[in-house]
Image (cartoon, rainbow, N blue to C red):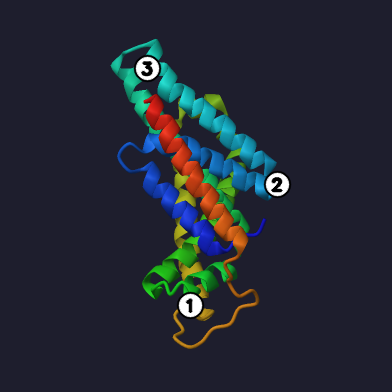
Amino acid sequence: MRLDPRTKIILVVVSSLLLFAPGGSVWTPAVLILGCALALSVRAWRRAVTLIVVAAALGTIAYGLPAVTDSVAAGAVAVLAAFALRLAVLGGVVAHLLSTTDIGDFTAALRAARIPKIILVPATVMLRFFPIVADETRAVWTAMRLRRLTGPGQVLRHPVLVIEQLVVPTIASSLRIADDLTASGLVRGLMDTGPTTTFRPPRLTTVDGGVLVLAALLFYCSFVTVGAMS
């Protein structure tokens, strides 16, 4: 199922606003189902299963731990798990945007929506930034594993060293990548004020409208059901 980038952006923005608004836990089931449905629509089976498992684990900690003990530490862990749960379910929707959207289609969609360039340029750069940084982080972790810095014993004995070996190269690489991507975007005409062309002009279809309607119904059902239970 091919969606217009604007539809995917709307889903990400609306999900973010609902999840992190006051009382955002009401919308967590809807965003979780939405993320799984989007993953299944492109046959991303592993992403869907991972999302369900992570959400179930975090949900168990967030809502099950306070029922077992009422200690302050347990309450703090439960609060962190509840926040992480919202991030995890939102990540399912964001992952669909990042994995299925070509940078050219994304830029063309933002131009068609008449998004100001002050937003268009950072958004386009960030769309390419996150996947590349993820690859760089995996490469750094692989190098650390070859040096035997990722074992449980090494992490427990020298936690600061392990964090330093992972974070410092990743930050340095991220800064370089951000500069390169910004320069690449400017060279390709992101700031050009003249007319632009694209191989696949953005076009909203009935599929996009149907997905937005189904998402709205999903959010409504989640609000009614979870709100009534709480």
The residue that appears at 46% across and 84% down in the rendered structure is: 192
Circles 3 and 2: CB atoms closer than 8 Å: no
The residue at which mark 3 appears reads as: 66
Taking depth in this image into account, of 228 and 39 the one nearest to the observer is: 228
Left or right: residue 1 versus residue 230 is right
The mark that comes first in sequence, 1 or 2, is 2
Residue 203's image quarter? bottom right
The mark that comes first in sequence, 3 or 2, is 2
Tell me the kind of residue under disc 1: Leu
Residue 147 in percent (x, y) is at 60, 38
Q: Is residue 146 visible?
A: no
Q: How far apart are marks 3 and 1 (CA)?
A: 50 Å
Of the 4 image quadrants, the one containing the N terminus is bottom right
Badge 1 element? loop
Tell me the kind of residue under disc 2: Arg
The residue at which mark 1 appears reads as: 190
Q: How far apart are marks 3 and 2 (CA)?
A: 36 Å
The residue that appears at 29% across and 18% down in the rendered structure is: 72
The residue that appears at 58% across and 82% down in the rendered structure is: 197
The residue at which mark 2 appears reads as: 43
